[in-house]
Image (cartoon, rainbow, N blue to C red):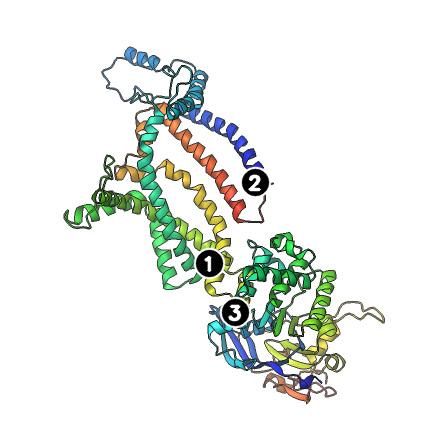
Amino acid sequence: MQDARATILDVANLTTVFNTRDGMVYAVNNVSFSLKAGELLGIVGESGSGKSVTMMSLLKLLPSPPAEITNGDIWFNGRQLREVSDDELRKVRGGEIGFIFQDPMTSLNPVFTVGFQIMEPLRLHMGLGKKAARIRAAELLELVGIPDAMARLRDYPHQFSGGMRQRVMIAIALACDPKVLIADEPTTALDVTIQAQILELIKELRHKLGMAIIWITHDLGVVAEIADRVAVMYAGQIVEHAQVSELFSNPLHPYTRALLETLPQMGGERAQRLRSIDGQPPNLDHEPVSCEFAPRCKHVLSRCTQENPKRRAVTPEHDVACWWQPGQEGEKDA
Amino acid sequence: MLNYTIRRLMFTIPTLLFISFVIFLILDLAPNDPTGNLPMTIPPEVREKIRISLGLDAPMYVRYLLWCKQFFINEPLNLIGEWFNICIGACEDRLRVRSWATRSPVVDLIAERMPQTLWVVGMSYVVSIVIALPIGVISAYKQYSWFDQIGTFVSMIGFSIPTFFTGVMLIVIFSVWVPNDSIFWLPSIYDTTHKVTDWSSFWFQMRQMVMPVMVLALYNAAQLSRFMRASMLDNLSQDYVRTARAKGLKEKTVLLVHVLRNSMIPVVTVIALSVPQVFGGAIITEQIFRVNGLGQLLIIGIQGADIPLVQTLTFVFAVLIVLFNLVADILYGLLDPRIRYD
């Protein structure tokens, strides 16, 4: 059924590097993924795995210098975003692709009213007048569950709580009916009860408005709850990608398996300690020539240190970038 | 906000009284006295008589209270009387604060000197703000570009070279090296008696203001542009800037609406806090260019041990500093919605 929907965003071989004073940082390496209309794609990975940088690269939101997109195609709605003019890109930003950021406490401008900040994209992209924009802004605030919306438009961000501010951010991102919403760890900075509220809100809005969502997170629980498909990122690469149920029931990459093992179990006997993945995430100061996960991998093969595995399809809906096959004995195990 | 302002204004009264007392104490402790500059041939008993005639034989607190009465009661009454052309009480023989050296009322002296100071120093301040803010904004936006590097270099020079050096250097270049008949020649002495009546006299006024204004503006702009740059840089890396860009706003809007408004908050405070300096005059620059403004008046007063003049002038500066502190606080509250005083 999902195949019937049109692909709205198609990213192929995206590579982003940072030219820092201490040398190059290879933050995103050959990342490819696609997004269909109305779909929710979860991107999972630990801090520094390149999740946010990938999404910011799509809209050139990274400061350049130091960031530079060196390779790849970004097809959005029939246009190659790497080649469009700055003016056109600005129309996509906020107009066709909405962004929600991690920290709602700092993501809103403290000296302007919430109303002004919601009305800005409305007036810019939809060409609304002041009055019409005001009415629409109030509708949006109501949509994201802020009561007494018309009056609250005159309030400043500091008069809102963290969860409320994230709702305002969502309202801004949704202002111009975007086709794609990119949510960059939108619940990470919030406490759990507020997280649950925001998750519910997004689910509901997705149902109502039918946009496609890319949800960046390091919380597997969140992904299991809302995503259709999941891509797991490690060291700036997608290492495994599958339907959400498939990924949780049949994880193929040792990193995905390790991640799932770190989740505490609800039932059964309580483990003595929480599990973690041994070792440190890799330094990104070189282009990947071998498997970046090899030093931490339980099933490492000699091939892993010589060749970087490409993503290979296991089923049409599931691919993994790993030399090891489940059931095969790793050399460390032997 | 109004309540806060009134409360703060009430607080300034004891503050200012205390300041005036401290100024009086310090001046009283100074070893000089008004007869110090008189010829050595004047015998000591005559000097003593001069002192007595000036009221210096009275105890310190009596003299202080007399000054208070003259400054806080007599002078305002006199001002009101002059403005409305009426006579309040014994207006003829009311004692005003008089300069010992010139015997004319100190307040009149200040009123005489004020226009020169406001023109030259005030104009230099305006010029420095107009120059410094755009430089700060561009330097921050294009950090480490050639514009920023040059801006940093010029600021360092402007800030580290004292005005008495730049002033004299400008005089050497524009009044000495440049021939008299060139249009680049500028007068090195500021003519206070010059009256602007037509275009040519206006042109002359502009020309005689150029050097002192530029010397002071360079110094102030150097400081201010650094402030502006730092404040912009602070804000450019904030998350809300990324949000503004993600909304699809033009770079100009992001910079001049979102970032600038936030960056101006500390800068406006700095600007407001240094306004009293404008009234205080730039003592050194006024000396170099012979602008007989308030700064020069203060120097003359100090040299001649003209205590009523120094006392009053210093106190007026203190009032301005206290007032503009309040202004800065109020501006802060107006610019930043997170700050509410009520």
Q: Residues within 10 Å of mark 2 (few under 14, many from 20)?
A: few
What kind of residue is marked 1?
Leu
Quadrant containing the N terminus of chain B is top right
Q: Secondary structure at mark 1?
A: helix
Tell me the mark number nearer the camera, choosing from 2 and 3: 2
Closer to the camera in the image, B79 or B34: B79
Q: Quadrant of residue B8?
A: top right
Residues beneath discs 1 and 3 located on the same chain:
no
Query: Mark 2 = which residue?
Result: B1
Closer to the camera in the image, B181 or A54: B181
Instruction: Measure the C-alpha gap from mark 2 to mark 3.
Output: 41 Å
Q: Position of residue B252 (x, y in %)?
A: 45, 62
- With A112 as the anchor, is B226 left or right in this view? left
Query: Mark 3 = which residue?
Result: A62
Q: Residues within 10 Å of mark 1 (few under 14, many from 20)?
A: some
- With A209 as the anchor, is A122 left or right in this view? left
* Residue shown at the point (70%, 87%) measured from the top left: A325
